[in-house]
Amino acid sequence: MTNRAQLLHSGTVFTGAGSPDVDAVLLMDGRIAGLGAEAHRLAEAATDAGSEVLRTDLAGAFVSPSFGDGHAHPLFGGLEEAGPQVRACGSVEEIVAEVKRFAEAHPELEWIFGASYDGSLAPEGLFDARWLDAAVPDRPVVLRAWDYHTVWVNSAALAAAGITRDTPDPELGEITHREDGEPLGILREWGAVDLIMDVAPTRPQEERLRALEAAGEYYLARGVTWVQDAWVEPGDVDTYLEAAAADRLPLRFNLAQYADPRKFAAQLPRFVADRQRVQAAKHPRLTANTIKFFADGVVENETGALLEPYCSALHKHGMSVWPGDMLKNAVVSADAEGFQIHVHAIGDAAVRQALDAFEAAIEANGPRDRRPVIAHAQLIDEADLGRFAQLGVIPCMQPLWAQQDALMTVLTVPRLGEERSDRQYQLNSLQGSGAALSFGSDWPVSSGDPRDGLAIAMSRTTTDGLPAGGWTPQEIVAPELALAAYTSGVAHQAFADSLDAPWGEISEGHAADLIVLARDPREQAPHDLPANPILATYLGGAVVHRQG
């Protein structure tokens, strides 16, 4: 179908923020061949010349560039489907029952892996290993929390990892304990989580390949055709390469290899080698141009790095993953190898540290088109807001988080206080400063459906419409600009303009990566947008998803 001309007509074609809409778009050889009147003219000319033109009457539907996801974890998301389904559970009892059901249905599994439970279901996120023991006493159980910075395990998993009351907290991690000193069953951040994962069996490659395909099905049904995998371990590179070789890559992916401060010097040569392996594969849907750094943790664990201490722990500023000049030096080294740098920074201290590291890379390595990324940027000090545009740093924001839901009111606000809480997720301010805003979901931490994120970006209210007028309404993003952040904004982050057939915009010569929505989202109430059907998703001119 990609080689046959296709005319989509009688609808509204969104060509980009600030650009006029047209009524038609012509696709040919996987690219945009014409728009509006020119699309009609070229289609007629092709028909007159004896070529077949497939004509699709949009019947008033809305055509947009397909969405991108600037920060996500597709393998994690796909693997959730292979374990106990705990995400929808609304109580500890429901989680335990689901784990028990799954374990009884799969007696062949030596370990039970699941994700991602709601950490607010137990006070302070402290879940007990004995609760899982009641469901599965004889095999290790490992459940990731919704934030993917925490795991809840049973006693068999603690024993397999050799974790006892005498095990010290590892570097970059915390082992929680009961009042009697025994390990509780909650492990926070990488150092502690690795104690379990280092002894756990590797998931079978076929299971991982199916997970990647499941993630692709999830994304394509939601109009997403490019994803930044923002946490790639060495075995993940092998999975992606095997999928590429078997033609099992459902959409476009860029890999961000995970940088560990405990072993970065040894990692960097492997990052270069794995980038070369991906380049040698020459698959049009796969790149590995990025390195991912964690500057801090998350506010809900009090591991997000803050300039001023937490309200809930007045002498605690959170966790700096790369203390001192470590992050700056590592970023300079990775930048010198030509990698794009992608930094997780939640707290205002972590954001400043990341900006300082980018500034050092520019000074040390000279000018080039870097497009460095700070993901999340939940809290930014006023003095640092303008530095994003000045340094060419892309804020990749998660708009779905910019609401006063239970996560915000129960876990975040008490830790930050009202004044700092009202400075979170400054989407509109960043865009207004000239920064190249992009949007991402952090799926499966939160919904990977851009329509859900757009609804919050355009309203700053919960699904119940609270608070009236929006929380910090000055940060509401106009509909066209919100759409741009999920399309052309992500394309800019992805260096799509450097490709032979760029994507992210509907322009002549660009790749025909499109979605067809039943209604124009710019004319909807924001919270009606998630129910706006995606009628079709096009990737390179081919229909890769169609409703029904």
Image: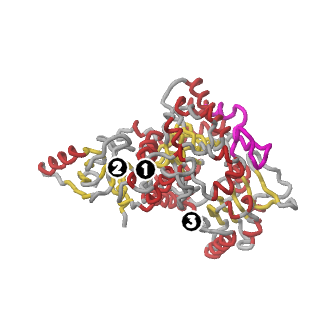
Instruction: Locate residue 300 relative to residue 167 in the image: left or right.
Output: left
Amino acid at pointer 2: Gly
Q: Are marks 3 and 2 in contact (CB under 8 Å)?
A: no
* Residue that numbered label 3 is attached to: 82
SS for callout 1:
strand
Instruction: Locate residue 478 relative to residue 29 in the image: left or right.
Output: right
Circle nearer the viewer, 1 or 2: 1
SS for callout 2:
loop
- Circle 2 Cα neighbour tier, 10 Å, few/some/many (<14 / 14–19 / ≥20): many
Residue 255, given in percent of the width and then of the height, sits at 52, 45
Residue drawn at x 69%, y 45% as measured from the top left: 304
Cα–Cα span, label 1 and label 2: 13 Å
Residue 46, given in percent of the width and then of the height, sits at 16, 48
Q: Earlier in the sequence, mark 3 or mark 2?
A: 3
* Residue that numbered label 1 is attached to: 67
The image shows residue 124, relative to residue 298, as above or below, that is below
Residue 96, given in percent of the width and then of the height, sits at 68, 71
* Residue that numbered label 2 is attached to: 540
The image shows residue 527, relative to residue 512, as above or below, that is below
Instruction: Locate residue 467 relative to residue 31 in the image: left or right.
Output: right
- Direction right: furthest residue: 180
Cα–Cα span, label 3 and label 1: 26 Å
Amino acid at pointer 1: Phe
Residue 410 in view here? yes
Q: Earlier in the sequence, mark 1 or mark 2?
A: 1
- Direction front: furthest residue: 468
Q: Which residues are magenta?
A: 304-331
